[in-house]
Amino acid sequence: MQFVLDPPRGVAPVRLGMTLDEAVAAVSGWGAPRVYRADAVRDFDPVSTEYHGIGFQMALERDHRVTAVTVWGPDEDEALDVQVLLDGLDVFRTPADEILAHAARNGRHVNDEDPEAPYVPGVTLAFTRATSQDVPRGATGLPIRFTSVLVADEKYRTAEPLHTSGEAGP
């Protein structure tokens, strides 16, 4: 299975602009997604699900429509038959520095002031290397590969991946 990052349109089968019902229907074939409601901590409704070790979170903000999709990479030994691709490169199996160099060669401005969380403004693509897992690390101590990637449009308010907490709601 391949999931293709398509900034700023989304990650198929989830497209930016989908309603809650459309987003839930798009991923329901993988199992029942968890829907969280906005609360004092979050001002958006996240929807969370998983496909063979690959985590998906969708943020529904403006007009209760999907405004961002975060894809979480698998553990080192999971999802061997699943790829998350950006321009043909597997985001979770290709070294992070190669992904960023490829993006720059293709004319995308890469903001890497924070090497743990580089991003491409305007599209929006945001990557993280943060993890507590025992993964291969480079000389700087950072994981060699990315652990998550966010796809949003240019209006997205932050370049940080989604985090959920709280109880699942109807």
Image (cartoon, rainbow, N blue to C red):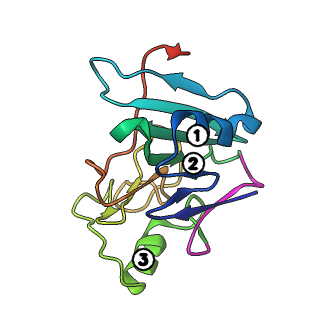
User: Residue under circle 2?
Assistant: 73
Q: Nearer the viewer, residue 73 or 135?
A: 73
Residue in the picture at 36% in, 61% down: 124
In the rendered image, residue 117, in percent from the top left (x then y), is placed at: 33, 54
Mark 2: few/some/many CA within 10 Å (<14, 14-19, 20+): many
Q: Secondary structure under badge 2? A: loop
Q: Disc 2 to disc 1, how far (Cα)?
A: 20 Å
Q: Disc 3 to disc 1, how far (Cα)?
A: 28 Å
Whether residue 61 can be seen here: no
Q: Nearer the viewer, residue 167 or 65?
A: 65
In the rendered image, residue 73, in percent from the top left (x then y), is placed at: 57, 48
Whichever of callouts 2 and 1 sits on the residue coming sooner in the sequence is: 1
User: Residue under circle 3?
Assistant: 103
Q: Disc 3 to disc 2, how far (Cα)?
A: 19 Å
Task: Look at the image and give the residue range highlighted in magenta.
Answer: 79-88
Residue in the picture at 69% in, 26% down: 32
Mark toward the viewer: 3 or 1: 1
Q: Quadrant of the N terminus?
A: bottom right
Residue 84 magenta: yes
Residue 111 occupies quadrant = bottom left
Q: Which circle marks residue 166 in the picture?
A: none
